[in-house]
Structures are given as C-alpha cells and as structure tokens.
Amino acid sequence: MPPAPPTPPAAERPVPVEAFVVDAFTLHGGGGNTAGVVVDAAGLDDRQMQAIAAALAFSETAFVVPDPAVDVAMRFFTPTREIDYCGHATVAAFALLAARGRLRAAELVQGTRAGRLRVRLAADGEVLMNQTLPRFGQELAAAPLAKLLGIDVAAIRATGLPVQIVSTGLADILVPVADEACLARVQPDLAALAAYCREAGAIGAHVFAPAAPGAPYTAACRNFAPLFGIDEESATGSAAGALACYLSRHADPRGERYGDRYVFAQGSQMGRASRLSASVERSGGTLAGIVVGGYARLVGTTTLSV
C-alpha cells in the first residue's frame, strides 16, 4: 500500500468560503445584475479573492473586509482583476448585510479604494449610495467609437452631445446615440474595444439613448467592459452616477430639461431588465453630490474552496 501523501501546511489547505449570489438594481423583484458577495473576507488574501471572483464569474464580487475607520469596508474583483469601486455589488452587499442584521444604522460610511462614501438604507429597502464627485475627462472623436460599436457615426452626432470620459469612481466612456432602436443595434468589436479603453484609460463604454416621450425612465443604457472581462452587464451603478452628472452638465446646465433626478433602464437586450435611480445634489448652483440607488434580492448561496 503506497504511503499517504503528506498533509499540506495549514496555510496551504483549501479554505471553504461561503459566497452569496445577489441580484442588484432589480425591476419589480426581477432582472438586475448579479453580484457575488462574501460577507466575511477577513482571512482571505488577494489571490484567494481573485480566485473566488473568477470561479463565480459574475461581473463583480464584493468582499467585506475589516476596517475600524468605517462602518463597512469592501474590495471589488472582476473575474480578472481588482477594481476600485462597483455600484451594483455595493447595492447587493448592503442589501444582504441589512437582511442578515449585520448593519447597526441606516446611515453608514463605506470604505473603498475609490474613497469613503456615504450609504443610506431607505425604509422600503432601497440602497442609496453616494459616489465621488465627477471627474470630467477628455472628449473623444465619435467616428472611432462608432466603428468599435458597429453603428453609423451619424447616430452619435445626431444627439448633439459629446463622447466623453466621466468618472464617479470608475472612468467610463459615455457614448450617446439617437434612440433606443440604435442602442439595440450596437454590436461591439470586444477585442478592439478593450484595446481602445486601455489606451484611453477607461474601464469600458457606457452607451445610452434618451427615452421616448412617456417612458418611465430618462435614458436606456448598455455597458461594455471587455478590458475587465465583462462583455456586457445588465446594470452598472458607477456608470449611472457618471451619466447623471454628464446629463446635468451637457443636456441643460440649469437642470431644466431633466431636473436633478434620473431613472436609467439597462439590461433589456440581455433579458435582465434593470432600473437604476440617480440624483444630483447641488449647493448654490454647484454640483455637490451624486447618489445612485436600487433594490436587490438574494438568489442563493454557494461554497467554494480556495
């Protein structure tokens, strides 16, 4: 009988980790964008967190980590790398922590690599999260983006709005198109888009179209981030904040066209209809804050060994 293999040191033994599966930015309890959430990641190192995110294969997974300086600290990983912030994983994590009785108040401070951010839990279960004040980056030529997205450049130019990089935690290229029919026709060259975003210093492209009159939302959106292993996702909280700030500045600086409150539809092309709310806060006419909100529901749990 062959000898038993040696027992690996404790540090090398697989560790079972419970991960929760949560849909965020749901619409009437359905749709939304699925995130992984690990509510106790204190003993996990970077390699283990990345392995869990890759195994779950959701666009992002949130890991709740210890930090006495804030109420809740989180790290966020896509299947391929760590990122500074994720809106839908934040909504998923806070909704889950609230449901499990892990939060001591309705007004909280979240710690992220993007900074410390306020999060509020509304009485009806909506998670409302402050994002960092917008950083408006360079405006980009429409023609290269149109080619990358598989649409006619006239669809972008007809809007009268710029293609621009904007960040409220993550830098997205905001691309306006004329209407939802054009939005539905977008078929990006994912490899070329990834290379373009790398060169531009952006996480992805957030393509949006103004809603038709009478629609219950301000704009419809699609988000592509192949550079970070995300071909398309059905709800993007960080980009919703960036888009609200962009519309506030470009559509009408006085806020008379849209006001300061927005609702964004996303995910319908993926069969995952989602809703994201966003509001711009002003002080003396100056943009002073951005809040993005949404609802979430627990889908299930899984246990991984890392």
Image (spheres, rainbow, N blue to C red):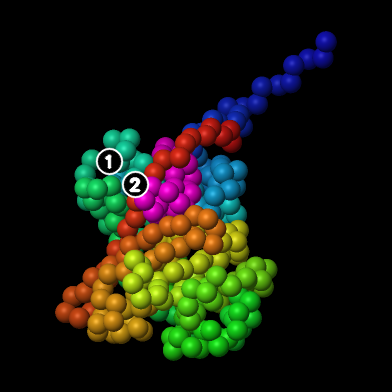
Q: Estimate the x, y position of residue 13 in percent, counting from the top left.
A: 60, 29
Could you tell me how far apart the alpha carbons at marks 2 and 1 are, in whole angstroms? 8 Å
Tell me if residue 72 can be seen. Answer: yes
Mark 1, other Cα within 10 Å: few <14 / some 14–19 / many ≥20 = some
C-beta proximity under 8 Å, tags 2 and 1: yes
281 to the left or right of 112: left
Q: Is residue 38 magenta?
A: yes
Between discs 2 and 1, the one toward the N terminus: 2
Circle 2: residue type: Phe
x 45%, y 75%: residue: 209
- Left or right of 273 on screen, residue 185: right
Disc number for residue 103: 1
Within the image, what quadrant is residue 100 found in? top left
Residue at 74%, 16% (x, y): give it. 4
Q: Quadrant of residue 154?
A: bottom right
Q: Residue furthest right?
A: 1
User: Which residue lies most toward the top here?
Assistant: 1
Q: Which mark is residue 94?
A: 2
Q: Give the quadrant of the C terminus.
A: top right
**In the image, what residue type sits under mark 1?**
Leu
Category of crowding for the residue at label 2, using alpha-carbon neighbours closer than 10 angstroms: few (below 14), some (14–19), many (at least 20): many
Q: Is residue 185 above or below residue 7?
A: below
Instruction: Identify which residue is drawn at 78% across, 15% down.
Output: 3
Which structural element holds mark 1?
loop
Q: Give the side of residue 193 with respect to residue 30, left or right.
A: right
Q: Which residues lie in the magenta part?
A: 20-40
Instruction: Say if 167 sits above or below 61 in the image.
Output: below
Instruction: Check the image and name the residue furthest to the front.
Output: 214
In magenta segment, residue 130: no
Q: Nearer the viewer, residue 209 or 36?
A: 209
* Count of number-bearing discs: 2
Q: Secondary structure at mark 2?
A: helix
